[in-house]
Image (tube, rainbow, N blue to C red):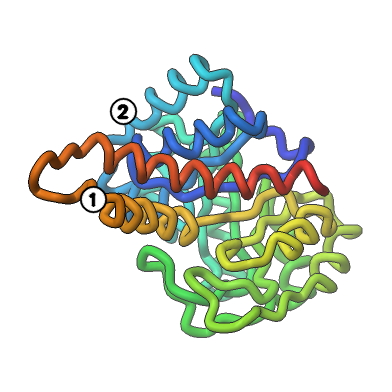
Amino acid sequence: MKYINLNREPFFAFNIWSIESAKAIMDAAGKTGHAVILQTSMKAFSRLDREALRFFVTDYGEKKKVQAYLHLDHCRQIGPIQEAVACGWDSVMIDGSDRPLEENIRLTNEVCGMTKGKGILTEAEVGQIGGVEDGIEAAQAGVARLEDVLEFLRNTDVDMLAVAMGTAHGLYGRVPKLHFDLIERISPLTGVPLVVHGGTGLSDRTLQRLMVCGNIRKINISTDVKQAYRQGIETGIQNGYMEKSGFDPLRMTDMIHETIEDMAVHKLNLLEKV
């Protein structure tokens, strides 16, 4: 297992749900030369053959000379985190943001105790990040309070922290108001890398601004991956790949792979322009 180096350039973390979706993102990483994080939601994690995915990411990464890491996203219970640690995930997120701050701190420290010394990073969240994504819903989303963030960091040994700053999971109904000022106030007070959830739908210019804002080292992209999958299906239908006569599932698979890879290449290329 290779330890995720958060001191390099920021990471794009793309949600995947299968070996095929992981391969498309890793091929994009190979084309651009940038490392990627492959995130599994709890919904995906519960259905995956975890050992097979772990083997594939390691083996394919070595063959293609791609740095790709597996991350368990938005987990609210200890059990699945224990399973992810046992299966060789590179990082895990314990999401106690829906609980009182003291309980969030206690839960985070319990997970940190499981991961420290094993080369596995722990991510946590302060303030609830809005929207709905693979069953994760924040009904009372808002912007994190600076004092809560600082208290959390003082009392935990977390490796990455997601701070609610105005982003949301899923598709935006309107342009979100992002609180860059909160990140700029937090960053000089801590060396802990910060994480942005809800990267889908943000403009290229906004993503690039996030990449250089304070301690932000990880930007999550989930819905864009699913929308690229959907685009691949639609394009395949338009091209006649779904016609009953002569139907070839490999052409549809290739089209879906291409649209996901192209989306990821576009995101990763933004790192060149920062």
Question: Which of the image's four quarters has the N terminus?
Answer: top right
Q: Which of label 1 and label 2 is nearer to you?
A: 1
Identify the secondary structure beneath mark 1.
loop
Q: Splitting the image into 4 quarters, where does residue 141 fall? A: bottom right
Q: Position of residue 145 (x, y in %)?
A: 73, 78
Q: Which residue is mark 2?
A: 52
Nearer-the-camera pick, 168 or 273: 273
Count of marks overlaid on the render = 2
Q: Which residue is mark 1?
A: 240
Inspect the image, locate mark 2, and give the three-letter code of the amino acid beneath it: Ala
Nearer-the-camera pick, 35 or 187: 35
Nearer-the-camera pick, 163 or 16: 16
Identify the secondary structure beneath mark 2.
helix
Q: Residue at x 67, y 46 (%)?
A: 159
Q: Position of residue 136 (x, y in %)?
A: 42, 68
Compared to 7, does 17 lie above or below? below
